[in-house]
Image (cartoon, helix red, strand yellow):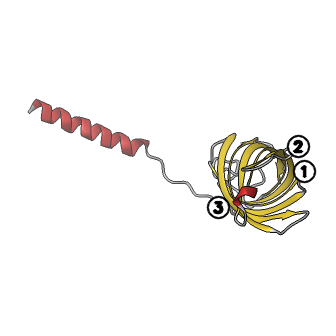
């Protein structure tokens, strides 16, 4: 009997404390987004729907055959951030040795960790050589971005440009990106 009474007292104390410590839900009467910075929503640099522009560069390695000399590429990526975890990338790059231009479009998904975010994506586009035929490519992508409280971004990434017309002409691009989120 003594244990039953103790258990009942403990339950009543816990239930009573729950009501005493509970807070009423608050509301905001301002326009949408007015909660940012006041304990409500948190928006990243540039906010949702922001744009970013990054300069990319690094190494370009052929899957088979002779390697490029020098094995380098340079590029530019424009991104529309639809959410903090999702963006759409439009990328262009140039590999100087065989004179290949590339254009890619596709989504990237990010972790919402801060200041380091990991990403993966899938792009499709074209390899446009100086001589020869234009080839369709699929390009899976992985990366890691450092995003500061300012709008500055720095990242590392790897793209595997799978040439669907000639697998032997596929390229792995590993590089650095530096950019700004508006």
* Residue 23 drawn at (x, y percent): 47, 47
Question: Dot 1 surroundings within 10 Å: few (below 14), some, or many (20 or more)?
Answer: few
The foreground one among 13 and 176 is: 176
Q: Quadrant of residue 83?
A: bottom right
Q: Mark 1 or 3, which is nearer the eye?
A: 1
Left or right? Give the position of 67 relative to 161. Answer: right
Q: Quadrant of residue 124?
A: bottom right
Residue 70's disc is 2
Vertical placement of 133 versus 52: above or below? below
- Residue that sits furthest to the left in the current view: 1
Q: Quadrant of residue 144?
A: top right
| Labels 1 and 3: the sequence-earlier one | 3
Left or right? Give the position of 103 relative to 142. Answer: right
Which residue is drawn at the image coordinates 79% and 66% (left, top)? 126
Q: Are marks 1 and 3 in contact (CB under 8 Å)?
A: no
Residue 29's disc is 3
The foreground one among 88 and 23 is: 88
Cα distance between the residues tagged 2 and 3: 60 Å
* Residue 26 drawn at (x, y percent): 55, 54
Tally the marks. Answer: 3
* Residue 71 drawn at (x, y percent): 84, 44
Residue 85's disc is none
Would you name the residue on which mark 1 appears? 97
Cα distance between the residues tagged 1 and 3: 60 Å
| Labels 2 and 3: the sequence-earlier one | 3
Vertical placement of 122 versus 5: above or below? below
Cα distance between the residues tagged 1 and 2: 7 Å
**Disc 2 on helix, strand or loop?**
loop
* Residue 151 drawn at (x, y percent): 81, 46
Q: Are marks 1 and 2 in contact (CB under 8 Å)?
A: yes
Left or right? Give the position of 120 relative to 100. Answer: left
């Amino acid at each position: 009997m003594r244990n039953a009474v103790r258990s009942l007292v403990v339950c009543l104390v816990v239930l009573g404390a729950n009501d005493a410590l509970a807070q009423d839900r608050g509301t905001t009467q301002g326009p949408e987004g007015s909660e940012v910075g006041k304990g409500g929503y948190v928006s990243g640099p540039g906010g949702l729907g922001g744009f970013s522009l990054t300069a990319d560069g690094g190494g370009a390695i052929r899957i088979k055959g002779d390697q490029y000399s020098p094995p380098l590429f340079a590029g530019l990526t424009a991104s529309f951030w639809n959410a903090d975890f999702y963006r759409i990338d439009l990328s262009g790059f140039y590999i100087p040795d065989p004179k290949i231009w590339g254009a890619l479009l596709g989504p990237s998904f990010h972790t919402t960790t801060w200041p380091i975010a990991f990403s993966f994506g899938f792009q499709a586009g074209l390899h446009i050589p100086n001589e020869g035929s234009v080839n369709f490519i699929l390009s899976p992508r992985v990366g890691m971005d450092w995003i500061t409280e300012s709008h500055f971004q720095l990242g590392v990434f790897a793209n595997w440009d799978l040439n669907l017309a000639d697998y032997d002409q596929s390229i792995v691009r590993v590089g650095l990106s530096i950019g700004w989120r508006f």
